[in-house]
Image (spheres, rainbow, N blue to C red):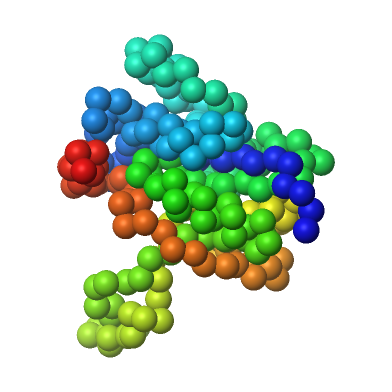
Amino acid sequence: MAHITSKYAIIVAGGKGLRMGADIPKQFLPVGGKPVLMHTISRFHAYDKDLKVILVLPKTQQAYWQELCEQYHFDEDYQLADGGASRFQSCKNGISMIPTDAVGLVAIHDGVRPFVSCDTISRCFDTAETAKAVIPVLPITDTLRFIGDSLSGRNVQRSDYKTVQTPQVFDIQLIKKAYEQEESTDFTDDASVVERLGQVVTMVEGNRENIKITTPFDLKVAEVLLEL
């Protein structure tokens, strides 16, 4: 096994906050006294203080983010990459910040998932050292119904399905090659991009608190999670 020399985390924060109904993007909304995105970055540095973080933000939001950093005295180390027209393009821009000849692993994470546990991050990185492509998942607890073309649909076995989270962790050279492909509507996450190359994706356990903050209800849940 090649020695892992580099570890990166790409945090993608391109949301416009439309479902939140707020005037500012959801990644900038305060939770527990500071913006969501700051919690997310801090979580990765809590896992590894030397982890190289790349933050992907739309150009139109970068000046406001810098203002927030000054306001909250947020001085954690990261590189800034420009967001693209789609999540695929944003991820590609973030990946391009990693040196061409880098050997190691990179995590790609949603900026609005501030409660990923250090254990989950560690499981993903540790497993990816040999598996090369790893995603954290959780079992489905709700009953699922497949609709398709039917009006009433039919129940399906929830044990056949998993909820997928981030960070998704990949071998750097693998993910660089994967993002050389043309963008496709079949790409629903980073794992689906590497699967197009024929790469097997390995699942590890995620953590239940690792919610994606997209609605006002999620913000209320986030405040409770911070108090636990």
Question: Which of 171/123 is in front?
Answer: 123
Instruction: Note whether 145 is above or below 206 in the view shown.
Output: below
Going 39% across and 29% down the picture, which residue do you hit? 38
Q: Pinpoint residue 83: horizontal percent, then vertical percent.
A: 54, 35
Instruction: Note whether 183 is above or below 114 in the view shown.
Output: below
Left or right, residue 201 beside residue 118: right
Going 54% across and 23% down the picture, which residue do you hit? 77
Question: Which of 120/60 is in front?
Answer: 120
Going 40% across and 47% down the picture, which residue do you hit? 116
Q: How many marks?
A: 0
Instruction: Note whether 87 is above or below 133 in the view shown.
Output: above
**Residue 11 in view in this figure:** yes
**Quarter of the C terminus within the rendering:** top left
Question: Which of 79/134 is in front?
Answer: 134
Q: Pinpoint residue 45: horizontal percent, then vertical percent.
A: 49, 33
Going 55% across and 47% down the picture, which residue do you hit? 108
Q: Pinpoint residue 128: horizontal percent, then vertical percent.
A: 62, 58
Left or right, residue 68 beside residue 5: left
**Residue 53 in view in this figure:** no
**Quarter of the N terminus within the rendering:** bottom right
The image quarter in which residue 154 lies = bottom left
